[in-house]
Amino acid sequence: MISKLPNASVSIFAKMTQLAIENNAVNLAQGFPDFPCPPRLQELLSIASQRGFNQYSAMPGYLPLREWIAQHLESTYHVKIDPIHEITISAGATQGLFSIISAFVGTNDKVIVFEPAYDSYGPAIVLQGGIPIYIRMREPEFDIPWDELEIVLRTQKIKMIMVNNPHNPTGTIWTMQDFIRLSDLCRDQNIILLTDEVYDSMVYDHQYHISGLQLKNYFEHIISCFSFGKTLHNTGWKIGYNIASEALTKEIRKVHQFMIFSVHYPSQVAIAEFLQENPNFIQEIKNFYEQKRNDFYSIMDTSKFHFLPTKASYFSLAKVPDAKLNTMDYAVQLCKEKAVATIPLSAFYHDHYDPHLIRFCFAKKNETMISAAQNLIN
Ligand SMILES: Cc1ncc(COP(=O)(O)O)c(C=O)c1O
């Protein structure tokens, strides 16, 4: 049998979670909250099912949810999005990204991916016969290497560029100047910009998220993906959405309808009703996670780790004290000997480049963080 993904294996997130279970370790590895999603949201899910929302929803998603999204994007990013033709509800951002890549990337098409990168990007491109062109962001700030990017764009035909903003795992953010610079570089080749914005509501220290959608004069070439799993503390529901012009959305939906047709109906109804009842919930997420980040830093103050300041997302990176060890081995050792599970940053590079950093997730109860800090001292 010929594998279509010969280099893929069980994801590092699943591996570290399994290791955490085996070693009874505190799991700060995988990116999900260990506290419940709002009880009212859980209740609305059950009510939606009892009210009969148990068959297929409309293919692009439950319209009241799409209408809520359009209003939310207008009030947050001052963009006018048509809920009928420009919004598609996906099974989490992952399925949205996959259908978008499937819709536009064909054999030998080149897609720029900045590394470190979320693990689904590369395989989704390769499965379409595309070629990921990996560009390493520059340490220690994880900046975009503009000079290198310009050379790639000048010398190669590029179909798409993927931008993850706010960024997992580094917690960095893009400015409007960054986006303008990128779109100016892309304009001549009509390159599609695919922005993965799943952490859009988690930007701290009085800074603001800039959405790709705000690039008004490049809108016809932009597709943006979002996830309710991150903002409503319910990653397991796998509900996200993507936004693009009507012409691009038409192509995305051609794939979406054959990949999944429509996503879990009662969840869409429950989310729409919850957000209508709690209009400030998403804005408050920013303060909630900023406090979590600050609590995490003060709780971890007793540990030997030096954390890089995180501006966004619910992740923080720490320097590995012993740079002689391969960071994957270090993370395994930390899990086995100190009972704290983390993710080595090398897992976010296709070639396992090792910047000697590990990623902690602080979307955790404070008592979980305290247990981790105690384990690290002992
Ligand atoms: C950068 C990034 N994109 C996409 C996703 C996937 O989002 P979803 O759970 O909605 O599929 C994640 C989840 O961790 C992520 O970190």
Image (cartoon, rainbow, N blue to C red):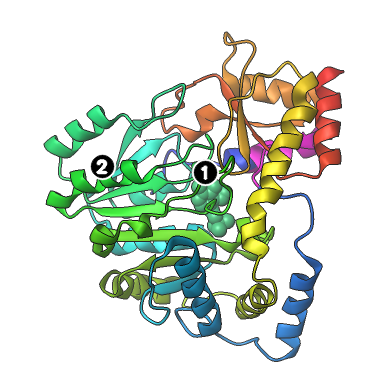
Q: Residue at x 48, y 50 (%)?
A: 209
- Apparent side of residue 378 relative to residue 160 in the rendered image (left or right): right
**Amino acid at pointer 1:** Gln
Q: How many marks?
A: 2
Chain part drawn in magenta: 14-31
Q: Is mark 1 within 8 Å of ligand 1?
A: no
Disc sitting over residue 181 in the figure: 2
- Considering every residue shown, the one lying at the far bottom of the view is 52
- Compared to 322, does 87 lie above or below? below
Q: Position of residue 224 (x, y in %)?
A: 40, 59
The residue carrying mark 1 is: 207
**Amino acid at pointer 2:** Arg
Q: Which residue is drawn at 33% across and 75% down?
A: 254
Quadrant of res 98: bottom left
Q: Nearer the viewer, residue 272 or 42?
A: 272
Among numbered discs 1 and 2, the one appearing first in the sequence? 2
- Apparent side of residue 349 relative to residue 191 in the rendered image (left or right): right
Q: Position of residue 100 (x, y in %)?
A: 36, 62
Disc sitting over residue 86 in the figure: none
Q: Where is residue 316 in the image (x, y as percent from the top left)?
A: 62, 33
Task: Tell me, yes or no, if residue 1 can be seen here.
Answer: no
Q: Where is residue 240 in the image (x, y as percent from the top left)?
A: 53, 65
